[in-house]
Amino acid sequence: MRHVWSLLAGIALTPVAWIVVAYGQAVLFDAGQVGGHHPLWLGLALFAAVGLVLGLIGTLRVSPAGPLFMALSYLGATGLLIARPETARQLLPDLVQVGGTLVVPLSPVSTGVLGLIGAMMVIAVASPQRWRSWPRPAAEPSWPEMLAPPADPYENTLADRDSFSGFADLRTPADASGVDTPSWSAPTKV
């Protein structure tokens, strides 16, 4: 069932992330123009939000189905634009208006942003860490085992560790070697 939920999340987030990236690019373009109406931080915040959400989806060890769907979608769109540019332009709408801003849905594909995101998702799916089994918690000792005396009576006990042996252990190896000792003597009064 976890694969189904991951796949549904990937199907839902793929077009949303695509449009948010396209909107972020339109905002950044507008912010760079003289007399632009959008602040630069808005476009950067949109990119950061998409990056955080996709990073979360890509790194969760729930299921690789969602990130794989996203990766194949984004890489497929980029590959289609490279192989058949006219077909890619016909499949995507020219302009979409989002919040009064004209957004070009083809811009994330033509600038290579979706190809980059798709490649990162493939790396997340192919990561060996995702395929390792979850670490099993170590068995905690029971109370009788914790209170039992040690098997070796000469084992380092808490009383041995708490004894104070002076500051002899605080010398570093450099102190003992005499490397830091100057080879000259300080001038004296005559």
Image: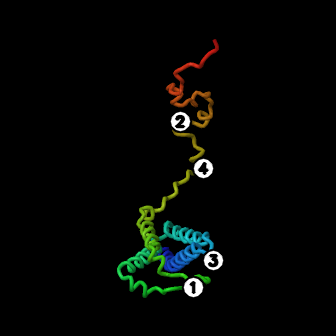
Which amino acid type is marked by label 1?
Gln
Q: Residues within 10 Å of mark 1 (few under 14, many from 20)?
A: few
Residue corresponding to mark 4: 143
Residue toward you, 181 or 102: 102
Residue corresponding to mark 2: 155
Which amino acid type is marked by label 3?
His
Label 4 residue SS: helix
Distance from disc 2 to disc 1, alpha carbons, whole Å, reads 75 Å
**Residue 171: x, y in percent?**
56, 29
Residue toward you, 30 or 56: 30
| Precedes in sequence: disc 3 or disc 4 | 3
Label 2 residue SS: loop
Residue corresponding to mark 3: 37
The residue under the point 58% across, 76% down is 30
In the rendered view, tell whether residue 173 sits above or below residue 98: above
Label 1 residue SS: strand
- In the picture, the disc for residue 97 is 1
Total numbered badges shown on the rendered structure: 4
